[in-house]
Amino acid sequence: MVTIKCAKCRSKIFEYIKIGKGKLLHCWKDRIIKDYSIQNGNEYKCHCSNLIGIDEGKWIKMKQRSFTCSGTISKKRSKKIK
């Protein structure tokens, strides 16, 4: 699980399950565990009014340099049991 924080005020934005290597370009909505953001229309903002990302349907397109990440990254996605 990865904790995504605001780059300005360091408050939590999301608790997110990141899978695989690479940058965090967008967040899939079904992988967000906890959401601490403020939603204004299709914009996701921090409490300090810093724009974090924009809603694109199934995912949130993250604005680079407006957030920081910390935590562990999963290498594989586990199969869902129905």
Image (cartoon, rainbow, N blue to C red):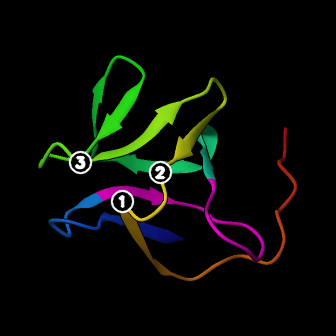
Q: Which mark is residue 50?
A: 3
* Image location of residue 18, percent across then percent down: 64, 65
Q: Look at label 2 and name its amino acid.
A: Lys
Range covered by the magenta-colored residues:
13-25
User: Do residues under tags 3 and 1 come within 8 Å of each other at their CB atoms?
Assistant: yes
Residue 48 drawn above or below residue 30: below
Is disc 1 in contact with disc 2, using a CB cutoff of under 8 Å? yes
- Mark carried by residue 66: 1
C-alpha separation, residue under disc 3 versus residue under disc 2: 10 Å
Nearer the N terminus, badge 3 or badge 2?
3
- Residue 67 spot, x, y in % from top left: 38, 63
Q: In which quarter of the image is the C terminus?
A: top right
Question: Which residue is at a point 65% across and 78% down the rendered structure image?
Answer: 73
> Residue placed at 20% from the left, 70% from the top?
10
Q: Which residue is drawn at 73% across and 74% down?
A: 22
Query: Quarter of the image holding residue 75?
Result: bottom right
Magenta segment, principal secondary structure? loop
32 or 43: which is nearer to us?
43
Q: Identify the residue at image location x=38%, y=29%.
A: 43
Label 1 vs label 2: CA separation? Answer: 6 Å
Determine whether, in the image, residue 18 is placed left or right of residue 48: right
Find the distance from the CA under tag 3 to the CA under tag 1: 7 Å
For mark 3, give the secondary structure.
loop
Q: Position of residue 61 (x, y in %)?
A: 57, 42
Residue with the most extreme top position: 41
Name the disc covering residue 63, or none.
2
Mark 1 neighbour class, 10 Å CA radius: few under 14, some 14 to 19, many 20 or more: some
- Choose the circle earlier in sequence order: 3 or 1: 3
